[in-house]
Structure formats: structure tokens, C-alpha cells
Amino acid sequence: MTLEETFKKIDEVMEKLSDDSLPLEESFTIYKEGMELLGNCQKTIDDIEKKVEEISNDT
């Protein structure tokens, strides 16, 4: 999944969580999914930052 696709999925998760009629257990499951997606985004961003630093140091 690309970073852009992950951001879109996070937006979908946030929209689902804003539904007040969602049962608590389902809300928790969706929240957990969102946190995993955020973790994946952070890892991807960290990897990109490392690559940029390596490129910057090579020049």
C-alpha cells in the first residue's frame, strides 16, 4: 500500500469513528486498525527521511 493509499484509509477510519451509533467493540477494532495504519505511515516516513539523509550526506 502506498503512503497516499494509507492516508486515504486513515481518513476512512476517522470517518467511521465519527459515527456515534457504532458499537464500542467495533469502534475499538476500527481504532486499532487506524493506529496500525499510522504506525505504518510513520515507518515509511522514517525510512524516506533516512534515505534523504544518506543522499544529502553523499553530496
Image (spheres, rainbow, N blue to C red):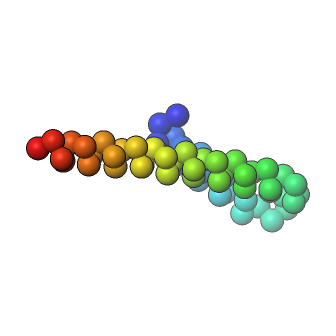
The residue at the point 81 percent across, 65 percent down is 20
Q: Is residue 15 shown above or below 44? A: below
Q: Nearer the viewer, residue 38 or 23?
A: 38
Q: Is residue 44 left or right of residue 56?
A: right
Q: Nearer the viewer, residue 49 or 13?
A: 49
Say if residue 48 shows up in the picture.
Answer: yes
Q: Residue furthest top?
A: 1
Q: Nearer the viewer, residue 27 or 40?
A: 40
Q: Is residue 11 left or right of residue 17?
A: left
**Residue 28, image x and y in percent?**
80, 56
Q: Quadrant of residue 18?
A: bottom right
**Residue 45, image x and y in percent?**
42, 49
Q: Nearer the viewer, residue 15 or 5?
A: 5
The residue at the point 70 percent across, 48 percent down is 33
Q: Is residue 34 left or right of residue 55?
A: right
Q: Is residue 54 shown above or below 20? A: above
**Residue 16, image x and y in percent?**
72, 55
Location of the C terminus by quadrant is top left
**Residue 17, image x and y in percent?**
73, 59
Q: Residue furthest left?
A: 59
Number of labelled discs?
0
Say if residue 8 shows up in the picture.
Answer: no
